[in-house]
Image (cartoon, rainbow, N blue to C red):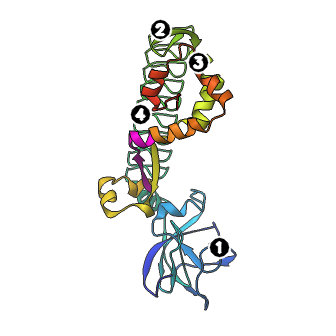
Amino acid sequence: MSENKVVKGYKVFNPDWTCRGIQYEVGKSYEIDEKPIACTRGFHFCQKLNDCFSYYSFNEKNKVAEVIAYGEIDDTKYDKLCTNKIKIQKELSWSEVLDKVNTGKCCTGRGNSGDRNTGNYNTGDRNTGYCNTGDLNTGDRNTGYYNTGNWNTGSCNIGYGNIGNWNTGHHNTGDCNNSSYHNGCFNTKPTKIYMFNKLSNWTMEDWLDSKARKILIYNVLVHPTVWVKECDMTDGKKRHHPEWSITGGYLKKLFQKEIFYKQQENWNHLKQEAKDIVMAIPNFDKEIFKEITGIDITM
């Protein structure tokens, strides 16, 4: 809880200028005689306009205003503040809202650093999906161009998870495939895959449907990155990761030793039945397995 001070911020209201049963009006001040407690009593607002839309839908029918808090402040919550004295300073038009929540131009979404996006958090241009770093995508999280699927790093794909181009299937690393899970080009049928450096009798779909994969993903393997929230970032980290101002944090990479240690621990806690399923993967090689995962199956 902080002492009385003037803090500028933003507040979103229902289309009729109400919020939690209180009727507001631009230019007027509102006060309560009690200490503010976030999510319990007081007037809530955010210092970043983008944070407001974690609590209100991103809808142009809602009213948005610049506000001034001049009473006590409860700042114990991550992305919103609460005060016992607030003034509704100025209404923002929807075009002003879009300018403030995007660093790109002519966007109808929010959190965009590219231009003419109708989705959110795009760094490329003219995307209608979300989190694209390329241009003209209608899917999500593409780093290429002209994709209608999701998670593509190539271009002109209508499937998802492709890192090649002009694929109509999924998870292809080559070009012009009309099927899925290929490393080459112009394929229409699923192929056998290499496992532990040798050709196996499994296709990629066999692997994706296998119990061994589920055991490793859900019980053993560790995600190599950790999301660090803005409130946990030092000033140095903010300078090193300027994207925090849009995303609200950054992805921290774990050291390989830390990943291997955690994966070995997870393996040690597996039941023997689960270990046997993993070791029954075609061509299983304990030395290669250790080299890649850090797991010594003899421990």
Instruction: Tell me the number on the disc at residue 143.
Output: 4
Tell me the CA gap for discs 2 and 4: 22 Å
Q: Which residue appears farthest toward the bottom when viewing the image? A: 33
**Within-10-Å neighbours for mark 4: few <14, some 14–19, many 20+:** many
Query: Is residue 224 at least partly visible in the picture?
Result: no
Looking at the image, is mark 2 or mark 1 earlier in the sequence? 1
Amino acid on which the number 1 mark rests in the picture = Thr
Nearer to us: label 4 or label 3: 3
Q: CA distance from mark 1 to mark 3?
A: 60 Å
- Residue receiving disc 2: 186
Question: Disc 2 vs disc 4: Cβ atoms closer than 8 Å?
Answer: no
Is 245 on the left or on the right of 16, as rendered?
left
Instruction: State the residue at coordinates (61%, 39%).
Output: 269
Q: Look at mark 3 in the image and give the residue it sits on.
A: 281
**Mark 1–mark 3 CB contact (< 8 Å):** no
Q: Position of residue 197 (x, y in %)?
A: 45, 13
| Residue 198 coordinates in the image, percent (x, y) | 47, 10
Q: Secondary structure at mark 4?
A: loop
- Residue under label 1, please give it: 18
Chain-order first, disc 4 or disc 3: 4
Q: CA distance from mark 3 to mark 2?
A: 29 Å
Residue 118 on image: x %, y %:
49, 45
Location of residue 220 by image quarter: top right
Q: Magenta residues?
A: 248-259
- Hey, what amino acid is under mark 4? Thr
